[in-house]
Amino acid sequence: MTRLLLVLLVTFATACGPVKAPAPEKPGAERKDRQFTFTWRYGVDDTSFAPRGGTSHGPEVTLETTPGPAWTRLREPGISALERDRRAILAMAGTFRTSFDFLEVAGFRPDFKPDRPYQSWGTEYVAVVRDDPRFISLQHLLVMFMKHDGKVAGPFVTKHWRQDWRYEDDEMLTYRGRLTWGRERPARAASRGTWTQAVFQVDDSPRYEAAGRWEHFGNVSTWRSGTTWRPLPRREWSVRKDYDVLIGTNQVTITPTGWIYEESNLKTALDAAGRPSGTEPVLAKELGFNRFERVVGFDDSAGRRYQERTEPFWAEVRAAWEDVVRRHPTFTMRAAADQAQLFVPLFEYAGKLDEGAPYDAADARTFARKTVATYLASDEAPAVTR
């Protein structure tokens, strides 16, 4: 348990820690430590508007500077549109230095005051869990080395988010607000040529899903989503209590040496029935820009080992969630999984496997189903169907 809490503390809790505020700017002086240029120039006290987020540091990494095999395969002439889409998705796999930037750019209430920008970082190994002709699953794993007083500690490995991509999906699982998700069937004509991106939390519980199309224009490959609802992420619920849901769009763009993930969100308050609240439900518009820069010579072996040793167990957890979705057109969780620490038993079980404990398929299946059942507001447990 100590090791688990250390990993969680390093990789998650620091993302909400304090950031030292810069000294006030003298008139006419050039600020060399400014982090944002697309920000609030007037009416905001610069000493209290420093970015919040992770305060930890890692050792220097070497970034890939020339296009790698993933980019070359994506640009290959003569392949089908479907295959080019697939190669764009697979280009998101690998090992990356990641950076996360979020900024409120507009307010929609008379008393609006912009929140501090958010910045954080990480090093991630993105594994291909499945690669089928019309379905691709990518698992993100944080593989962190921490630098303090000239010494490097680590690696610290934590299972992070997962993204599943499905071509011409005939059913989506969408967030409805108030910890409720439901199945949704898009019109067949509307889904033609589209890919859905379904995003899951660290414990494989659902987060959000949206449909969109890949567009390949010369040396640019971009997927743009439709509008989707999603629950508050950790960077927000840990400091904000004045809104309930993010309503927005996502955009993925592949670059020669990595990829970027953009978000455009409306921070929206809901009423007790899960509908936008009153005549002024929207607090602010937020833009997010997340960079995944491919690294070379980085020791991601601990992440690869974790993925190999724990994947059979996490497959059972995914199956338990799939059974929930199959049995319930809509379902509600009794608490937010990350806020209520519901994921801890799953992480502990996987941690023992990572440390070399033997894998028992029957025990893993029973444990996964029993644990997932504790998430649900209803008393009905997922059935063991396999």
Image (spheres, helix red, strand yellow):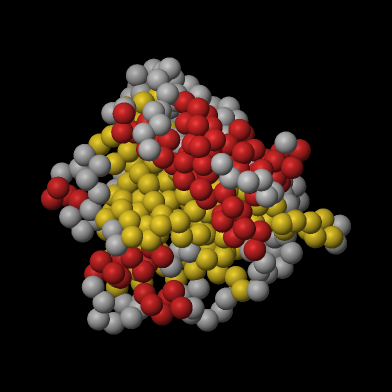
Residue 72, percent from left and from top: 41, 80
Q: In screen coordinates, is 155 left or right of 359?
A: right
Residue at x 68% of width, y 56% of height = 144
Residue 102, percent from left and from top: 53, 49
Q: Quadrant of residue 209?
A: top left
Residue 41 visible in this rendered orientation of the protein? no
Q: Give above or below for 88 relative to 37.
A: below
In this view, which residue lies farthest toward the left? 189
Residue 326 visible in this rendered orientation of the protein? yes
Please state which of residues 380 and 86 is positioned toward the viewer in this rendering: 380
Please state which of residues 261 and 18 is positioned toward the viewer in this rendering: 261
In this view, which residue lies farthest toward the right? 149
Residue at x 35% of width, y 54% of height = 165
Please state which of residues 104 and 354 is positioned toward the viewer in this rendering: 354
Residue at x 60% of width, y 63% of height = 97
Q: Give above or below for 323 relative to 86.
A: above
Please state which of residues 318 and 81 is positioned toward the viewer in this rendering: 318
Residue 189, percent from left and from top: 13, 50
Residue at x 84% of width, y 60% of height = 151
